[in-house]
Image: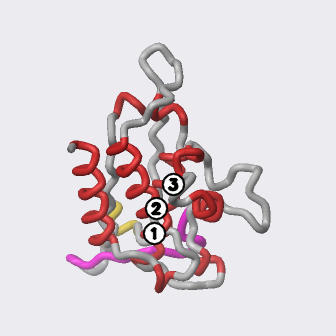
Amino acid sequence: MITSQCQLYIVILNPAMFDMTAHVGDFGLARFLVRSDTVPNQSITSTGGIKGSIGYIPPEYGMGGQASTQGDAYSYGILLLEMFTGISPTDERFGDRLSLHRHVETAFPTQVMDIIDTKLFSSDHGNENAFVPENSQECLVSVIRCGLLCSKELSKERIAMNDVLKELNLARNKLLV
């Protein structure tokens, strides 16, 4: 059984917009719980090795940091940024000085629509829709803000997941207005 101490929430604006293959994500605190045959009603946890996938691992894990909910927030933030930009955190354009977080941060908030995946606004016929309703733009800015706040380099600067949930619910409400 796999458990996690952090619940994750994703706002799906319109499932028909996404032409993505689902992947099982790992977030630092996921652990395997194994029943011990010798000690009834106890479990053994294993978290050895690197705790995450390349591109989604928080910086502190690379420096020997312990798994934490802040690490899970980082991974979730990167996932949000990837979903809405269509760019993988391991994209070859990101070298030593650039990352998905920095790429998005440089466009935020005034040029955020320039980095949003154009597939989010394509019509049924595959043509890009040049007009994006104001409430959609506000919603996207809010979601991107959450992704940026989750994926801050320093763990103490990251937003708590319960605050992310509140922000994403507000973003959804902006879209539905």
Asked if residue 45 lies in the magenta stretch, the reply is yes
Question: Image height check: is 41 above or below 78?
Answer: below
Q: Measured from the top left, where is residue 47 in percent x and y?
A: 48, 74
Q: Measured from the top left, where is residue 79 in percent x and y?
A: 49, 55
Residue at 53 percent of width and 52 percent of height: 112
**Sequence-first tag of 3 and 2:** 3
Q: Measured from the top left, where is residue 157 in percent x and y?
A: 47, 82
Query: Is disc 2 in contact with disc 1, using a CB cutoff of under 8 Å?
Result: yes
Question: Image height check: is 158 above or below 168?
Answer: below
**Amino acid type, mark 2:** Gly
Q: CA distance from mark 1 to mark 3?
A: 10 Å
Q: Which residues are magenta?
A: 40-52
**Sequence-first tag of 1 and 3:** 3
Which residue is identified by label 2?
147
Which residue is identified by label 1?
150
Task: Tell me the tag on residue 67.
Answer: none
143 or 10: nearer the eye?
A: 143
Query: Is disc 3 in contact with disc 2, using a CB cutoff of under 8 Å?
Result: yes
Q: Quadrant of residue 33?
A: bottom left
* Badge 2 element: helix
Which residue is identified by label 3?
81
